[in-house]
């Protein structure tokens, strides 16, 4: 095996360790999606329609491709968090290999290996590849689309452009409009850089647009034309429309949340009386705007090497000539710029893990830039000073990110770690500048190691994060108690991983053939019971509790028909109740309270907090109330 292949193998081993270490116990699990996979194992109908619960009462709020892959894994290996997380690990490793191949093809082995290593040590990529969210699948599909686009740009062959469009369409069926960030970039590149004549280019792009639309909308339109009674209600859609979900919840609401002002005012009012019950705006929050992604908490997710991307990218452009190298640079830069603009402007629904869509482009540009700077350095002369200069700028940038954490999040190094880091960078930069006439290779290796030290630390901290429920996000090692408490509180937003064993036993013992084991005010309360039992549980308001799935009369008829007996309302601390609680289903909750009998909590709630390990409960169940809707049936 040649040296480059050995290096790639070593990089993949590091990637596998970071992404696979204790994955079943420390992965980031969103219980809502895990319940959906358990449901899809039950029937082909649930599988195709991406149902959240085994009765097909409501769907998941994302398209199905990533969940189909997770379901196949769970069918093959048995249902568990590990079997559902493994596909994302594999997809992450394949994305690293594919990025290496794409960069190496035009810019050489050093650039390809550096790009692969940069992606391996991108903290948010580690977090996402350790989660059951859909971004790992989407990234792999987009990288495959980039490969097809590069080949189409090289050859002008229509079939490669159509393949690219089809792959992006598959990406749409993985996370809807999130897949379209690269479409303008690829279209403009083909229009202005492809070999065919102008007229042929326009015709090719028209055909590709038709393929993109057909593949993207294929599943959505099937869902849309299926009678509402024959498929689940569309979660997070007030009109029970998959097209509305595309445009609304997964489109417009990512930029402007429809209830943002009212929700902020209500949270501010509640915080005056109960500040401990209100979660902060976000675990890694930064306000929307041009400098949003420069905020330390977001930059730490994926932008540690940003100065290297800029300075090295310019150097690579100068040495790239007029051929395919510059075209590829435009592709990666356009990818990063397009998603950067989108996420900077997203003032509505936003999570830090969305930023992983920037990771491949930034890693590619960092690897290309590192190779270009090292090439200039080895040539000597004034150009050799660019590398030590870039090292200084990059370390100052990383020190800025680190300083945003050191005083409020880290339990070690509060006073010395930033100065020590800058001193080490200054010494290395000086050595690189002084020895540029006879540059030893180990100095460049040491410089790269220094630049990768902090992203590696954040990646290791993410891999070793305790607990396995919550939305994925990168975190540093050695968090202090206050930061740990904040992150644990944010984990409860995703909900519990599995239900209280006493609640499960209580419901199963008293089930007399009712179709639904339980009705819960939202999917966060329903998911743990579905995960534990695989039985139908009704999520009255979908994930957020806001969906108008059933009216009071509809629910009353279900109760009268003995299709459901027990209802679980209430949703934990005041902040969670405000976001997900029964206020969104006020009429139903009032009917439940008026027509049901409260069940004594000592009969169904565990005193010690319930099971341990991957079955452990979340804090949101503390304030829940169980009602028996057939009081004459006894308890």
Image (cartoon, rainbow, N blue to C red):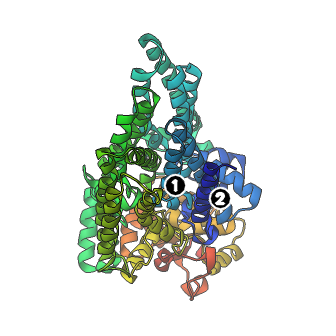
Picture residue at 72% right of the left edge, 50% below the top:
43
Q: Is residue 364 left or right of residue 537?
A: left
Q: Nearer the viewer, residue 249 or 84?
A: 84
Image disc number at residue 5: none
In which quadrant of the rendered image does the C terminus lie? Answer: bottom right
- Badge 2 local density, few (<14 within 10 Å), some, or many (20+)? many
Image disc number at residue 86: 2
Q: Is residue 500 left or right of residue 178?
A: right
Q: Nearer the viewer, residue 142 or 516?
A: 142
Tell me residue 503's x, y (percent): 62, 77
State which tag comes first along the sequence, 1 or 2: 2
Picture residue at 45% right of the left edge, 67% below the top:
458
State the count of labels: 2
Q: Quadrant of residue 192?
A: top left
Whether residue 74 is situated above or below residue 345 in the rendered picture: below
Element under label 2? Answer: helix
The reply to whether discs 1 and 2 touch (Cβ–Cβ < 8 Å) is: no
Element under label 1? Answer: helix
Picture residue at 54% right of the left edge, 74% below the top:
467
Q: Which residue is disc 1 drawn over? A: 117
Whether residue 83 is situated above or below residue 239 in the rendered picture: below
- Badge 1 local density, few (<14 within 10 Å), some, or many (20+)? many
Q: Is residue 269 left or right of residue 438?
A: left
Tell me residue 86's x, y (percent): 65, 58
Image depth: mark 1 or mark 2 in front? 1
Whether residue 307 is situated above or below residue 487 in the rendered picture: above
Query: Can residue 527 be seen by looking at this rendering?
Result: yes
Q: State the separation of the CA atoms marked 1 and 2.
A: 21 Å
């Amino acid at each position: 095996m040649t040296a480059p292949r050995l290096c790639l193998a070593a990089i993949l081993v590091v990637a596998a360790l970071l992404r696979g270490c204790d994955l079943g116990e420390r992965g980031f699990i969103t219980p809502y999606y895990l319940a959906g996979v358990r449901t899809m194992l039950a029937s082909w109908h649930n599988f195709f329609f991406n149902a959240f619960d085994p009765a097909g009462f409501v769907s998941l709020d994302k398209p199905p491709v990533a969940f189909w892959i997770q379901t196949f894994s769970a069918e093959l290996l048995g249902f568990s968090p590990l079997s559902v997380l493994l596909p994302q690990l594999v997809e992450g490793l394949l994305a690293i290999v594919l990025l290496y191949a794409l960069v190496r093809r035009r810019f050489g082995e050093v650039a390809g290996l550096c790009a692969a290593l940069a992606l391996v040590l991108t903290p948010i990529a580690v977090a996402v590849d350790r989660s059951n969210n859909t971004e790992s699948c989407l990234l792999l599909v987009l990288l495959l689309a980039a490969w097809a686009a590069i080949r189409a740009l090289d050859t002008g062959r229509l079939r490669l452009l159509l393949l690219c469009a089809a792959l992006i369409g598959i990406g749409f069926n993985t996370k809807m409009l999130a897949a379209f960030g690269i479409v303008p970039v690829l279209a403009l590149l083909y229009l202005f850089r492809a070999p065919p004549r102008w007229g042929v280019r326009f015709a090719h792009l028209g055909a590709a647009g038709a393929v993109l639309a057909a593949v993207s909308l294929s599943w959505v339109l099937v869902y849309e034309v299926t009678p509402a009674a024959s498929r689940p209600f569309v979660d997070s859609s007030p009109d029970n429309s998959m097209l509305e979900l595309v445009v609304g919840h997964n489109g417009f609401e990512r930029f402007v949340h429809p209830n943002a002002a009212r929700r902020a005012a209500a949270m501010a009012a509640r915080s005056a009386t109960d500040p401990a019950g209100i979660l902060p705006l976000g675990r890694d929050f930064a306000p929307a705007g041009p400098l949003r992604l420069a905020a330390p908490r977001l930059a730490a997710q994926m932008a540690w090497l940003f100065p290297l991307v800029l300075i090295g990218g310019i150097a690579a452009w100068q040495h790239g000539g007029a051929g395919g190298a510059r075209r590829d640079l435009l592709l990666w830069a356009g990818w990063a710029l397009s998603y950067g603009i989108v996420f900077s402007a997203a003032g509505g629904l936003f999570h830090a893990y969305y930023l992983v869509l920037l990771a491949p482009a930034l890693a590619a540009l960092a690897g290309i830039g590192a190779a270009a700077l090292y090439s200039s350095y080895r040539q000597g002369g004034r150009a050799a000073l660019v590398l030590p200069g870039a090292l200084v700028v990059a370390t100052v940038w990383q020190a800025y990110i680190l300083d945003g954490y050191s005083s409020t999040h880290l339990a070690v190094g509060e006073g010395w770690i930033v100065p020590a880091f800058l001193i080490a960078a200054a010494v290395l930069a000086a050595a690189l500048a002084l020895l540029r006439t006879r540059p030893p290779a180990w100095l460049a290796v040491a410089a790269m190691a220094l630049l990768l030290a902090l992203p590696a630390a954040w990646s290791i901290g993410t891999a070793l994060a305790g607990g396995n429920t919550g939305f994925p996000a990168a975190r540093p090692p050695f968090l202090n108690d206050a930061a740990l408490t904040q992150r644990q509180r944010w984990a409860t937003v995703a909900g519990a991983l599995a239900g209280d064993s006493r609640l499960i036993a209580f419901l199963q013992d008293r089930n007399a053939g009712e179709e639904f084991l339980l009705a819960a005010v939202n999917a966060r309360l329903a998911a743990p019971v579905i995960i534990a039992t695989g039985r139908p549980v009704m999520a009255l308001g979908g994930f957020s509790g806001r969906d108008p799935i059933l009216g009071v009369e509809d629910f009353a008829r279900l109760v009268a028909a003995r299709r459901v007996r027990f209802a679980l309302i209430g949703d934990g601390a005041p902040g969670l109740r405000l976001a997900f609680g029964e206020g969104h289903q006020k009429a139903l909750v009032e009917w439940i309270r008026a027509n049901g009998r409260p069940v004594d909590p000592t009969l169904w709630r565990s005193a010690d907090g319930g099971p341990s390990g991957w079955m452990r409960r979340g804090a949101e169940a503390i304030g829940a109330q169980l009602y028996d809707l057939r009081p004459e049936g006894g308890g």
